[in-house]
Image (tube, grey):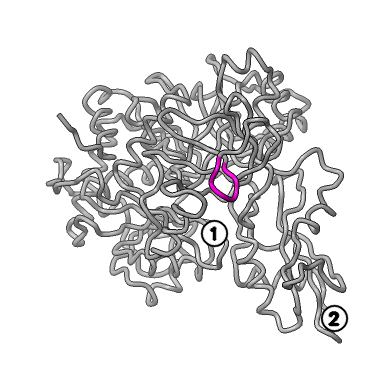
């Protein structure tokens, strides 16, 4: 017998088995059992249905880590709609592109971020705009809680949802100016949550603290995995080190996630307070980290001084994301803690390979470099409205495998270690930044003759964008002015944090900038680059 794999299965199970368990603790401390969560989800579903949302329609959300993020996700999917979480750090212009690309029918926005939507309302296809605490938003917005008020708590009529139907669209920065909409089906989301459960060791008595942005691949799948397993979500609107330690103690948190920059911020807060910080409740704490590999010193501080256990994972938005992890007690016992700086071996029912230019597997010697390719049920269905990019992603070196663009080695135990990025992506504080997108913004300046953007080391963020610029003859550009120029066009976190002015670039015979040589100049004294062992 075949049973369709749907994202709604996770909340359904929580209600069936854990209806009286606290499912969600809102940022303000309000607590909702899973039965109450489901009631609110159903009310929102009815409200969206009244606005014409039906199977296949897109509901876009711009919000931090909140209870209504979880509610919006499940309400949308119960109606057969497609959930589109957006990065709340984007500018109005970037949000306008996304909302038009996905043809969103409804936009829901938090009061802290709706100001970026308000100026573009007339330029997007959406007909309905709902604001959380709408009274705090300039403009005409329907209030979120008002929409729930008076709606029935009964289950909405669910359409016939197949596992291959679209469930979500998550936008990621690529190597071109336009972000790509990563389309994931009910099956890919469902399968990924099961894989996540296995490798993150999620149990029904877990209390999970949301420091990781929920919009990132739907919170790395934890919106589904924690719910379906019966754990408790503790919401933190945006990351704050002091508040993180406070909530860990107050709610006896057992699990959280964070990029290495989160770990570094927690360590800095701990050091600023001379180590006089309560780091756990009554239970052991584990933290999953991804992006750039944490330094050995970071691992030692978090594990030895905080008493937490680090789980290092690797993946991309296109892969749901988790496809490898170094969480292998057997290998850790054999090889020691240094193993945790590797991206790890393939997850359950996932085929991860490292291949050369001809698509052949590189030797498992830990030194030969190739590209990571992956085949698995959690891999995306396609890029929205980009058939050529989709075709290339699945057929560049080897047919039927998603090509990550990350260059890595693989050792005899199948442990991969990223060495460089085939695509010019900068990962700053866990956020993907396209160097080409930043370069395009620099080229909008009339006095910029050539521009290259590379990652440079940052103690706080792991790496940040640096612009290297050749001015036009007679120009007199200033670093601060050029950075502000980019910030007017892109989200602030994408802007260069520094600018060097040079006479020319190292280039190939065909005129291509040799970014590798540029990067070497700034990383020469570093222990390793982001993602490296």
Front in this rendered view, residue 430 or 126: 430
Q: For this view, does 430 lie left or right of residue 30?
A: right
Q: Relative to residue 471, is residue 421 depicted above or below?
A: above
Residue located farthest toward the left when viewing the structure as drawn:
157
- Point 53% across, 61% down: residue: 90
Q: Image point 87% across, 44% down: which residue?
A: 525
x then y, percent, for residue 491? 59, 63
Instruction: Give the residue displayed 43% in from the left and 33% down from the top.
Output: 350
Structural crowding at the residue carrying mark 1, measured as other residues with C-alpha within 10 Å and reported as few (<14), some (14–19) or many (≥20): some
Q: Quadrant of the C terminus?
A: top right
Q: Nearer the viewer, residue 263 or 417?
A: 417
Disc 2 + disc 1, Cβ < 8 Å: no
Which-is-in-front pick, marks 2 and 1? 1
Please state the horizontal and vertical placement of residue 8, each as a whole percent of the image: 25, 39
Tag 1 residue = 174
Residue 15 at x, y percent in the picture: 24, 29
Is residue 527 rendered to the left or right of residue 157?
Answer: right
Range of residues picked out in magenta: 355-360
Determine which residue is flagged by label 2.
476
Residue 87 appears anywhere in the view: no
| Element assignment for label 1 | loop
């Amino acid at each position: 017998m075949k049973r369709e794999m749907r994202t709604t299965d996770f909340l359904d199970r929580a209600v069936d088995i854990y209806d009286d368990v606290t499912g969600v603790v809102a940022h303000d401390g309000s607590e909702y059992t899973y039965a109450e969560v489901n009631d609110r989800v159903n009310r929102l579903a009815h409200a969206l249905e009244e606005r014409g949302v039906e199977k296949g329609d897109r509901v876009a959300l711009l919000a931090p880590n909140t209870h209504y993020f979880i509610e919006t996700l499940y309400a949308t999917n119960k109606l057969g709609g497609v959930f589109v979480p957006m990065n709340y750090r984007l500018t109005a212009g970037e949000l306008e592109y996304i909302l038009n690309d996905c043809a969103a029918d409804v936009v829901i926005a938090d009061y802290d971020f709706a100001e970026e939507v308000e100026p573009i309302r007339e330029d997007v296809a959406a007909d309905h705009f709902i604001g959380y605490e709408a009274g705090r938003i300039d403009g005409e917005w329907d209030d979120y809680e008002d929409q729930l008020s008076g709606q029935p708590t009964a289950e909405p009529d669910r359409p016939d949802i197949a596992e291959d139907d679209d469930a979500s669209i998550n936008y990621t920065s690529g190597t071109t100016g336009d972000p790509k909409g990563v389309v994931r089906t009910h099956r890919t989301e469902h399968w990924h949550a099961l894989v996540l459960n296995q490798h993150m060791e999620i149990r029904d008595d877990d209390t999970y603290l949301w420091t990781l942005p929920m919009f990132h691949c739907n919170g790395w799948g934890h919106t589904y995995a924690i719910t379906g397993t019966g754990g408790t979500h503790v919401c933190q609107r945006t990351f704050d080190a002091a508040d993180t330690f406070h909530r860990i103690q107050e709610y006896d948190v057992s699990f959280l996630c964070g990029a290495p920059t989160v770990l570094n911020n927690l360590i800095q807060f701990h050091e600023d307070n001379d180590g006089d910080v309560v780091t756990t409740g009554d239970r052991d704490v584990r933290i999953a980290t991804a992006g750039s590999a944490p330094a050995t010193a970071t691992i030692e501080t978090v594990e030895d001084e905080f008493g937490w256990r680090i789980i290092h994972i690797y993946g991309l938005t296109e892969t749901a994301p988790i496809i490898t992890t170094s969480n292998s007690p057997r290998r850790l016992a054999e090889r020691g803690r240094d193993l945790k700086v590797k991206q790890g071996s393939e997850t359950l029912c996932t085929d991860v390979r490292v291949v050369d230019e001809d698509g052949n597997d590189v030797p498992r010697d830990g030194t030969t470099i190739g590209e990571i390719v992956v085949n698995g049920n959690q891999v995306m269905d396609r890029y929205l409205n980009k058939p050529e990019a989709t075709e290339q992603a699945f057929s560049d070196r080897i047919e039927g495998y998603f090509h990550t663009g990350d260059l890595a080695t693989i050792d005899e135990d199948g442990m991969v270690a990223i060495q460089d990025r085939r695509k010019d992506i900068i990962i700053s504080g866990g956020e993907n930044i396209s160097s080409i997108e930043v370069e395009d913004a620099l080229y909008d300046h009339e006095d910029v003759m050539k521009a290259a953007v590379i990652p440079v080391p940052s103690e706080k963020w792991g790496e940040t964008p640096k612009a290297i610029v050749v001015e036009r003859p007679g120009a007199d550009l200033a670093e601060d002015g050029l950075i502000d120029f980019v910030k007017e066009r892109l989200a602030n976190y994408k802007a260069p944090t520094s600018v060097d002015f040079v006479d020319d670039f190292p280039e190939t015979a065909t005129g291509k900038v040799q970014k590798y040589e540029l990067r070497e100049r700034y990383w020469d004294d570093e222990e390793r680059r982001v993602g490296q062992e």
